[in-house]
């Protein structure tokens, strides 16, 4: 089976909101960067979708790039809107819930 080609977005001006489209009843993702140092992924959540509480082994930076979401970290709720950014510490339970359909950029920092 041939190896999949990696998409090269280097040295391009990108509007991250254009990289994933909303799909009814779904969460859509697109990984932009995948290195030993970390990853950058864009997500589009339809209204009513979300990620249940979970942990990750790395710190993660979540930035809302469209819409509104409610982010829960260690049981505390953080209402967020377009442009807001929050750091989710490694090994701390967190969840993502839509307020409206929304898009986010997630940067995982591997340590």
Image (cartoon, rainbow, N blue to C red):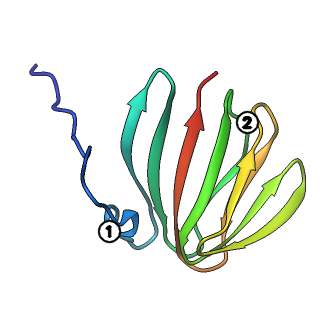
Task: Name which residue lies at 38% across and 44% down.
Answer: 31
Q: Are marks 1 and 2 in contact (CB under 8 Å)?
A: no
To which residue does mark 1 refer?
Answer: 18
Q: Residues within 10 Å of mark 2 (few under 14, many from 20)?
A: some
Q: Nearer the viewer, mark 1 or mark 2?
A: 1
Local secondary structure at mark 1: helix
Q: CA distance from mark 1 to mark 2?
A: 28 Å
Q: Is residue 27 above or below residue 55?
A: below
Q: Which mark is residue 55?
A: 2
Residue 68 percent across, percent down from the top left: 63, 76
Viewer-nearest residue: 41 or 109: 109
Q: Quadrant of residue 110?
A: top right
Q: Is residue 52 above or below residue 97?
A: above
Q: Which quadrant: the C terminus?
A: top right
Looking at the image, residue 52 sits to the left or right of residue 25; the answer is: right
Looking at the image, residue 45 sits to the left or right of residue 111; the answer is: left
Task: Name which residue lies at 55% across and 44% down.
Answer: 107
Residue 4 percent across, percent down from the top left: 17, 29
Q: Earlier in the sequence, mark 1 or mark 2?
A: 1
Q: Which quadrant: the N terminus?
A: top left
Task: Name which residue lies at 56% across and 78% down.
Answer: 67
């Amino acid at each position: 089976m041939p190896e999949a080609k990696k998409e090269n977005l280097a040295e391009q001006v990108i509007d991250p909101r254009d990289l994933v489209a909303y799909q009814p009843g779904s969460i859509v993702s697109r990984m932009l960067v995948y290195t030993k140092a970390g990853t950058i992924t864009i997500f589009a959540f339809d209204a009513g979708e979300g990620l249940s509480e979970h942990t990750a082994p790395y710190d993660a930076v979540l930035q809302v790039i469209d819409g509104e979401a409610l982010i829960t970290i260690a049981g505390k709720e953080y209402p967020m809107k377009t442009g807001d950014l929050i750091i989710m510490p490694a090994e701390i339970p967190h969840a993502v819930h839509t307020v409206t359909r929304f898009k986010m950029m997630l940067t995982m920092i591997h340590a």
